[in-house]
Image (cartoon, grey):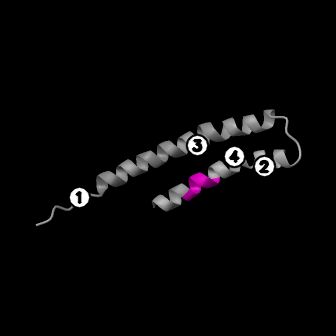
Amino acid sequence: MKMIKSRVGFSAQMIIAVVIGLIFVLALAVPIAQDLVSTANLSGTAAVIAGLVPLLLVVGVVILVTRLY
């Protein structure tokens, strides 16, 4: 008879990892990226591209969360 591994522990670990990742990106990475972009003194196309960095961080987190579940 094969032993079936419990997925409950795996799910709890995965949820904890996702929550820690969300806190890291939303509470640390996005504000730091926004501050760096605002103090970079960029103009034109460079400013537009640099302004998209915080948005791309959030989009990346959303994609990661949706792929995990």
Residue 4, given in percent of the width and then of the height, sits at 20, 62
Q: Is residue 39 left or right of residue 8?
A: right
Foreground residue among 18 and 3: 3
Type of the residue with mark 1:
Lys
Type of the residue with mark 4:
Pro
- Whether 1 is drawn above or below 51: the answer is below
Precedes in sequence: disc 1 or disc 3: 1
Q: Which residue is mark 1?
A: 5
Q: Which residue is mark 4?
A: 54
Instruction: Name the image quarter holding the N terminus.
Output: bottom left
Foreground residue among 50 and 25: 50
Occupied quadrant, residue 41: top right
Foreground residue among 44 and 32: 44
Q: Nearer the viewer, mark 2 or mark 4?
A: 2
Are the residues at dot 1 and dot 3 in contact (C-beta closer than 8 Å)?
no
Residue 39, given in percent of the width and then of the height, sits at 80, 32
Residue furthest toward the left? 1
Q: Which residue is mark 3?
A: 25
Q: Which residue is mark 2?
A: 49
Spatial CA distance of label 3 from label 2 is: 19 Å
- Whether 7 is drawn above or below 30: the answer is below
Residue 26, given in percent of the width and then of the height, sits at 60, 43
Spatial CA distance of label 1 from label 3 is: 32 Å
Are the residues at dot 2 and dot 4 in contact (C-beta closer than 8 Å)?
no
Spatial CA distance of label 3 from label 4 is: 9 Å
